[in-house]
Amino acid sequence: MVPEVAVLRSPQFAPKPDVVKRERVFGMTETWAAGLAMGVIIALRVVYALHYRVDSDEPQHLHVVWGWAHGLLQYRDIFDNHSPLFQMLCAPLFWALGEHAWIVTPMRLAMLPLYAADLWLVYLIGRSLYVQRWGLWTAVVAACMPGFFLVTTEFRTDDLWTTVWLVAVWLAVEGALEGRRAFLFGLTLGACFSVSMKTTLLLVAMVVAGLGVMVLHGLSRRNTGVKAMAKRIGLILAGLVIVPGILIAFFAAHGALHAMFYCVIQHNALPGLGKWAKAGFHQWLFPISLPVLLGLGWLCMHSSADERIGAGRALILMTWGAFYFLLKSYWPLVTAQDTLPVLPLVALTTVPFLFHVLSLTGWPARVAIPVTSLVVMGCEIGMIWRQQSPLDNRMAGFERNLAIVLHVTDPGDPVMDGKGETIFRNRPTYWVLEGVTLRRIQLGLIPDDVKERMIATGTCVALNNRLRPADKAWLRANYLQGTGKIWVAGKNLGTADEKIAFHTDVRGRYAILSRGGKMTGLLDGVPLQDSQQIAAGDHQLETTGGKGAVALVWAQAVERGFNPFTRKFAGYADKEN
């Protein structure tokens, strides 16, 4: 929230008024340079959408979207520990695309408009707080910040979260936060909460920054009236509750409010998780940072003779600074995507400072700023390239495994995966095996029922991914490894002999094969068939034909190209991970 402040003295980090007027109009060369830079960035984004490695969160989100597209209700029918708005909005596109192994790519490409909106909002905020040229080239530099570029390439809730958050920031700094603008600001914050509960940290950071601006303002001029402040807060709160209220009412109407509360709030609030496990110096980082942030905020407030501009600059700097130190001090598990919404704010502080330094050199702004920005952009692209070359297709392995699963299984077949890697297939267990869930299982708060649920549902395909050691050992005893991380129900029975005793825990339709020749004999006294139902338990095999190694394998996999002796699927044998 930007308080009313008096006109400030002695601008330090902004161009003089006559410079502002000159910099509002771009020449043709600069316009083409900026357009070409943005074209290169968007083209690179498309390439990375095709080739960038798949983060484990992406299929988790896509599996929830699949659930929405097929009439399943998030939280009640499918576990997820994120707010629901993003997945709900993506369901129509997902349904229209259908079941394909390449589903991640078009869903990533669907994030491009959000990325473009982020850059446009950076430009609008930069234009509002500085000048048009500074806003434009700040957007170019922000577009290639490695953390921002790569994380927004992924399909994740944080893409929409960042865009909606930047809308809120733009509303906060573009004009006085009162009346309709205050209501829209609250409405936008409510949408942020409906996308990610991590908005709690953003809101606390912005409140801290707003209070800091008010303190700095109070040291120099007059305070905003209590009545006016209360009205603004009331309008913000009125807007804030609308979107979350609609979603809560929807889930309550469908009998899933308790499940929603557990998954979104209670599940994630695990005492002893990460930084919450013990006290340490990290808890003091935020308090120690406050005087520094106030000092930098004071400089920002005095960097322009315009009261709105100075306060807006201070608000942005102190918001991202407070967020960063809150994250480092108190957030239990910190991931790359947690900082995504504040990275553009970092650019909106540091890049204009760089432009200010350039202005002191006397180099013409119409040359110095574009050239410097393009150099910085090139360095950023180099850092992105070092993390993963755009020519290195790390999507291929994921798509190949997904294609195999879709080929081998039918839509109704359960498949055990860790976080929804098979996207289009239901897990036999309700839980997603992400970090918080695994910790809860370790503490005994959630039952480790993976084996039991796989047995109960007759799950014949699994991904050996994120399983606990005991479950991995059980998997190796009852499944055969195929291409990549795909395992198929079955086991090696040794070599052809007169009698073979074996045990399986997983019921299903199996085939018994030998490496050489057709397998004949008796299974539990009944003549062998090409495939037959085999119950869980102990069995006796008497062989009369076949040579070499003998294997028990899920018949459907064999019929669809799986060779238990080479561990390959037909058509995929020459494409290992």
Image: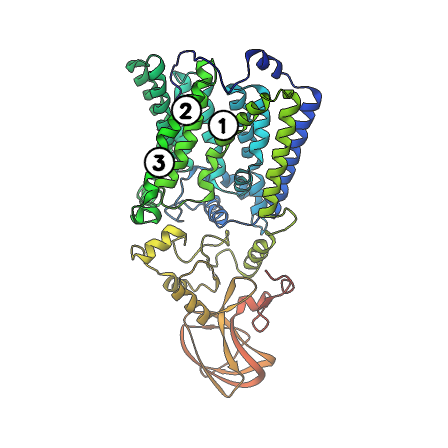
Within-10-Å neighbours for mark 1: few <14, some 14–19, many 20+: some
Q: Which residue is at a point 55% across and 13% down the rendered structure image?
A: 16
Q: Nearer the viewer, residue 39 or 128?
A: 128
Instruction: Write down the quadrant of residue 380 in the picture.
Output: top right
Decide if residue 170 is in sight here.
Answer: yes
Where residue 438 appears, x then y in whole percent? 37, 55
Q: Which residue is mark 2?
A: 297
| Camera sees residue 254 | no
Task: Name the element at disc 1.
Answer: helix
Residue 171, compared with residue 570, is above or below; it is: above
Residue 349, disc = 1
Of the pair 69 and 224, the residue shown nearer to us: 224
- Residue 234 x/y as whole percent: 32, 21
Sequence-earlier tag: 1 or 2: 2
Q: Are marks 1 and 3 in contact (CB under 8 Å)?
A: no
| Amino acid type, mark 2 | Gly
Q: Residue at x 47, y 29 (%)?
A: 166
Mark 2 vs 3, N-terminal side: 3
Of all residues, the one furthest to the bottom in this rendering is 498
Check the image and report above or below for 63 versus 549.
Answer: above
